[in-house]
Image: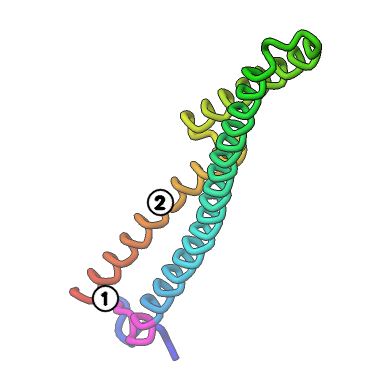
Amino acid sequence: MRPFSKGSKNQRRTPSIKTKALKPDIQNREREAIILEKEEAAKRHAGLELTRGRREEATRQSILGLEEKITAMSQQLSLTKGDPSTAADIRELYARRDEAVQQQQQLEDKVRRGAYLSPEEERAMEELEDRLEALDAEIEYKGQVSLNRFRV
């Protein structure tokens, strides 16, 4: 079958019904491919969000654990302050407590910054967010094009 109707050379050629039917089918396949790509990007994004959430929880748990250790070491120090026979132990306990306080401060800074992902993971997250926005716009555009074709 010919894609165009018969007619003279001077007559304007119009696409046949079969050609008109193929265009929406191609557009639907393109739209479906975009939707599939969006779903894959959303899965990767959700995976990074899950990783971020898990690391945030682990960081908060670490902070709580350090607070408990610091409190216990401080109590032990207050009990042994008057005992001169344990001076070396006291110095070691002060050093361990100071180290724990420093670790706690670093973790609290991490929480304030929200830095739970590596720089590469953060960059991937930003790229995925941008890609998702672009795919949403493309899906909307394809939908509008399809609607406009049916109106005409």
Disc number for residue 26 = none
x and y, in percent, of residue 150 in the image? 23, 76
Question: In the drawing, does residue 15 fall left or right of residue 44?
Answer: left
Disc 2: CA contacts within 10 A as few (<14), some (14-19) or many (>=20) = few
x and y, in percent, of residue 144 in the image? 27, 65
Disc 1: CA contacts within 10 A as few (<14), some (14-19) or many (>=20) = few
Q: Amino acid at mark 1?
A: Arg
Q: Secondary structure at mark 1?
A: loop
Q: Secondary structure at mark 2?
A: helix
Write down the residue under mark 1. 12
Point out the stretch of residues depicted in magenta.
11-21
**Residue 25 shows up from this direction:** yes
Question: In the drawing, does residue 134 fall left or right of residue 99?
Answer: left
Q: Residue at x 42, y 56 (%)?
A: 135
Disc number for residue 134 = 2
Question: In the drawing, does residue 127 fall left or right of residue 95?
Answer: left
State if disc 2 and disc 1 touch (CB < 8 Å): no
x and y, in percent, of residue 5 in the image? 33, 86
Q: Is residue 58 above or below residue 21?
A: above
Mark 1–mark 2 Cα distance, whole angstroms, equals 39 Å
**Residue 123 shows up from this direction:** no
Instruction: Out of 119 and 13, give the one closest to the viewer.
Output: 119
Question: Magenta segment: does it hold 16?
Answer: yes
Q: Comparing marks 1 and 2, which lies closer to the viewer? A: 2
Residue extending furthest toward the bottom: 1
Q: Is residue 57 above or below residue 82?
A: below
Q: Residue at x 53, y 62 (%)?
A: 40
Q: Residue at x 59, y 44 (%)?
A: 58
Question: Magenta segment: does it hold 120?
Answer: no
